[in-house]
Image: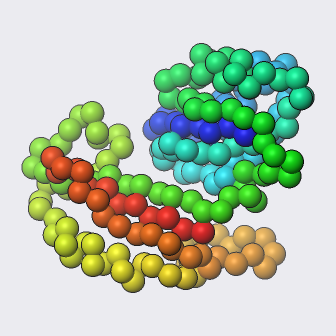
Amino acid sequence: LRLLVAYDGAGYRGFALQPGQLTVAGVLCGAIERHLRHTVELVCAGRTDRGVHAWGQVVTLDARSDVDPVALQRAVNKALRPTIVVRAVARAEPGFDARRSATGRRYRYTVLNRATGDPFLQRTSWHVPSPLDLPAMRLACDPLHGEHDFASFCRRPPGEASLVRLVREARWVDEGAGVLRFEIEAS
């Protein structure tokens, strides 16, 4: 099965299972296993760190062919809302694997750029009270486009896996009312 998952990561120690820690995968796996009545192993498109939120995390798992995706979605959402929500469940095509079949990732960061903060955005944005130069920030995105080696930003994966990524899009969007959004898409 292929799940599309959204979560508020503020109370979790990241996505990946960690013994003795509250993680998104841990509670998601628990809810799925209670519904299916057997153990499952989740594979995600990309793990998130402590406190990171996701809107479209793709997760796969093996399940019997008679599992009703709608019933599974309803049961998991009832058990985990409001911090974790399964937005969609579908049968995955043969050979699909959330991690290895991913063709790209999109990240979005929100900056609240106004004198006064907002308690309703504080968990999902960075408050910068002094004015920012949006045209200069947009120009600064230009060098991000193209292929880059990100080895200095993460642990080296096992084997000879490359950390060279293609940044297809990097841009700043002005949503109005002092809300700026930085989007970056890479493969």
Residue 177 vs residue 102: left or right?
left
- 156 is higher (above) or lower (below) than 59: below
Question: Which image quadrant for residue 63?
Answer: top right
- 171 is higher (above) or lower (below) than 77: below
At 75% across and 75% down in the image, what residue appears?
161
At 39% across and 83% down in the image, what residue appears?
143
Q: Quadrant of the C terminus?
A: bottom right
Can you give x and y, in whole percent of width and height, for residue 123 in the image?
35, 40
Residue 41 vs residue 81: left or right?
right
Residue 118 vs residue 14: left or right?
left
Residue 17 visible (yes or no): no
Question: Which image quadrant for residue 28?
Answer: top right
Can you give x and y, in whole percent of width and height, for residue 72 in the image?
72, 22
Is 165 or 39 nearer to us in this picture? Answer: 165
At 27% across and 33% down in the image, what residue appears?
120
Is 117 or 145 nearer to us in this picture? Answer: 145
- 1 is higher (above) or lower (below) than 47: above
At 66% across and 29% down in the image, what residue appears?
27
